[in-house]
Amino acid sequence: MSSWLFLIPLLPLAAAVINFILGRWFLQHASQWLATLAVAGSFILSIPVFLEIVSDEQAISQHLYTWIPAGDFDIPVTLFVDQLTATMLLVVTGVGLLVHIYSIGYMHGDPGIYRFFSYLPLFVFSMLMLVMANNFLVLFVFWEAVGLCSFLLIGFWYRRRSAASAAKKAFIVNRVGDFGFGIGILLIFVTYGTIEYAGVFDMVGDASQTTITVIALLLFTGAIGKSAQLPLFVWLPDAMEGPTPVSALIHAATMVTAGIFVLARAYPVVSQSADAMMVISIVGIATAFVAATIAVTQYDIKKVVAYSTVSQLGFMAFAIGTGAWIAAIFHLVTHAFFKGLLFLGAGSVIHGMHEEQDMRKMGGLKKYMPITYWTFLIGAAANAGIIPLAGFWSKDEIILGTWLYDHTVIMVIAFITAFFTSLYMFRAVFMTFHGEERFNPDEVHPHESPRIMTIPLIVLAVFAATIGFIGFPPEDGWFHHFLINAFPGLTLPDVAWSTIFIFAGISTLIALSGLFIQYMAYVKKSISPAGIAGLLGPLYKLAANRWYLDEIYDVLIVRPLVAFSMFLWRFVDAQVIDGTVNGVATLVTYTSQQWRKAQTGLIANYVFAIALGAIIIIGAFMIFGSNLFQ
Amino acid sequence: MNELMPEQFMFLSAALFIIGMVGVLTRRNVLVIFMCVELMLASVNIAFVGFAWEFSQMTGQIFALFVIAIAAAEAVIGLGIIMALTRQRDTVDINEVRELRQ
């Protein structure tokens, strides 16, 4: 099996290249089938790889070629698959395939379709190489490559100014994190003399505790950017400018989890530093809470799901920070399915509503799009943590982890965040699908999406409902025993059933209370959301304005930068540099104009000048050069 | 007074040269200017020959012959130009010909 491991990333790459070169003139709409088939091929090939890892319980790898041979230092391009990678392979290719199929319906008729189906498999390729890398440099290369694909796809409708600037924002904000990430990799190389995982992880203990902490924190800096943690998450909600399938695949299911994946990959390093873990958990829980409060106040259906993604990524981050490594990856997997589902469902709603994203102009869509409704409901319930859907198992386990590893404060905030999660999820469901119809029926005719879009929804809904059972019973499930091999030295905690039941009970109670409140608010109308908003006053405004993070960046970074750029442009460039160049030219012109006057055309003048010059030169020569006058 | 002193031919040469130069500078008739240039060349020839005699070397003599030959060639060209000029412009006044102006 390991001998054709290389086909898994190669197929999407080939599809991307072919579509990019031939798509515009020859393939056009055929490009969608090529891309979908390629990703389907990767998915089918990933299954036996996964099964082999399950049965053999050891990592497989395939050396492709040596990228940089330089004496003792060489960078191999080697595909490496262990339990963690195998899980990611299935998630990336599985969700990726469904998103490709869905996109065929969603992007139907778009003139740039060949571009779309070139970027999308390119992203799948980059993501697969990212998870299959066996050293930090290749990881970093594809870390940047997924960032590039993200940029290209957010700005897919580049003629829209907002999409173009959202793409730039995503790219630039990510640069901040990537800068730290790059330095982290350099520090790894300086410290350990190698950047291959195996070599580094064997020697972790050789470095000082401070160095390990710094490395772990620098790697986490990269994760802050890519996985949209505080304070860099501002790019993710804006990234919703891209086509909705892109949001589902890249900004929910896969790419944003790359940061979490890297932390898990670097488990031997990160777990050695208690300080770094502390920072990760604090940043994670803060992200989860802040994003959840924002999500409750948003009206754009995609923005709600986007902030929900940020919040869930925060959950994964603080799970890692508190030491619940497997719960973090478990949540990563379940989240990929239910958040992919939610995005595709939101896309289906937007599609059926003729590109309307504002939930205030929806309502009562249940009877128009039943399949979208039921699948979206399953996704929302899974996200909110309703038993027995996928999100319940993973999220409950994360919260259980905070208690098991003695992080009581984080546990309390996590429960509050879970309550907000339930609030925003069911708010979105009830506002969109229930209640009165707030759109103009003469102009908008909501309709169910075509089958090519609903089938991926149904498949994802099935997974969102059932995938949680791979982690059942909690802390002792099949998934835990499978994944534990990827985390050497980690042991599964022994949890009493009573504890599990108490936590499950509290979680369910919280989730149901959120459901109940939103039901009263948006269906029964016995609670006025506006009244509550008014009651909370400044707190509501804080959340509704996204905690003023964009404004803070605007004042602290963007405006000074713009002002400085204006200074460089208007003063340094336009005046100093241009002034120097033009000044020299003007001076030469002026001087020449003056000298022109010497050109009289009178030969007598010229002869006089020659004679005078000769006399001066000879005179000078005689005075200074000869001894005649000395 | 049978010995030639260097001062003697030096003064003769310098005087001729200055007469020629002043002529070039002050006269407006192109033919006169041309003759003044010839005068300057002749003055240089005198200096050459005089010094050659003084130092008993042949170099100066040969140089004088070269200068005479070149002056002859230059006279042909110069007179040709003057002929062409007078035919075209019907003037020999140098100040009337200002083609070299800017």
Image (tube, grey):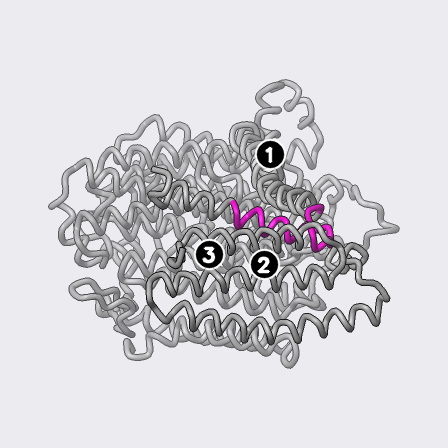
The reply to the same-chain question for discs 1 and 3 is no
Q: Is residue A504 left or right of residue A492?
A: right
Residue A297 pos. (x, y %)? 61, 33
| Residue at mark 2: chain | A
Q: Which residue is mark 3?
A: B9
Q: Dot 1: few (<14), some (14–19), or many (≥20) neighbours within 10 Å?
A: some
| Mark carried by residue A571 | 1
Q: Dot 3: few (<14), some (14–19), or many (≥20) neighbours within 10 Å?
A: some
In the image shown, does B83 or A551 lie closer to the viewer?
A: B83
- Where is A55 relative to A366, above or below? below
Residue A288 pos. (x, y %)? 45, 36
Q: Which residues are magenta?
A: A597-615
Task: State whether residue A294 appears in this view.
Answer: no
**Measured Cα–Cα span from mark 3 to mark 2:** 107 Å
Amino acid type, label 1: Phe
What residue is at 38 percent from the left and 48 percent from the top?
Answer: A259
Q: Which residue is mark 2?
A: A245
- Where is A7 relative to A533, above or below? below
Q: Mark 1 or mark 2: name the one nearer the start of the chain.
A: 2
Q: Dot 3: what SS?
A: helix
Q: Dot 2: what SS?
A: helix
Residue B21 pos. (x, y %)? 61, 53
